[in-house]
Image (cartoon, helix red, strand yellow):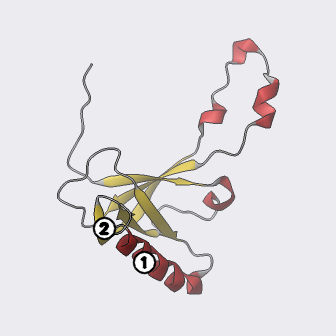
Amino acid sequence: LMVLHGTENAYVVAQVHQAFVRHVRVGDEAECILKLYPGDVFAGKVVNLFPVTRSAEIDAGAGIDPAVFTQPAEPYLVQIELESPPDRLPAGATGTTAIYTSEFGASHIFRKIMLRMDGWMNYLRP
């Protein structure tokens, strides 16, 4: 078993709740903070939206399972390419991402402030 990891592009994959993914478009601005780099904010852009969740994986030959209708809403995945990535971005690093869509444009300033405060808090609670 071998895992290959390309180094030509640095990107993160963010989970976006189904209620909010309808506003996200390719090209939207985004910012990420990583617990690995407290206090740093990494700018990026949305490059891909994965249009499927795990709950879409149904075995067609097994019939309809009643549990399918009681599943909670799962998040969709959004790929964000970082403009100035850190020197080392190990797979599985965790953090927080904000995507700035065309909706609620004036409120983006509040989210930017909150994201930076969370980044500074990573010094105290890694």
Residue 14, image x, y percentages: 47, 54
Numbered label attached to residue 100: none
Determine crowd level at label 1: few under 14, some 14-19, many 20+ residues with C-alpha closer than 10 A.
few
Identify the residue under disc 1. 117
What residue type is disc 2 on?
Pro
Identify the residue under disc 2. 38
Q: Residue furthest top?
A: 61
Residue 38, image x, y percentages: 30, 67
Determine crowd level at label 2: few under 14, some 14-19, many 20+ residues with C-alpha closer than 10 A.
some
**Along the viewing direction, whichever of 52 and 97 lies nearer the viewer:** 97
Q: CA distance from mark 2 to mark 1?
A: 10 Å
Left or right of 26: which side holds 65? right
Image quarter (top left, top right, bottom left or bottom right) of the C terminus: bottom left
Left or right of 116: which side holds 50? right
Residue at screen point 34% across, 50% down: 93
What residue type is disc 1 on?
Met
Q: How many marks?
A: 2
The vertical placement of 17 against 102, above or below, is above
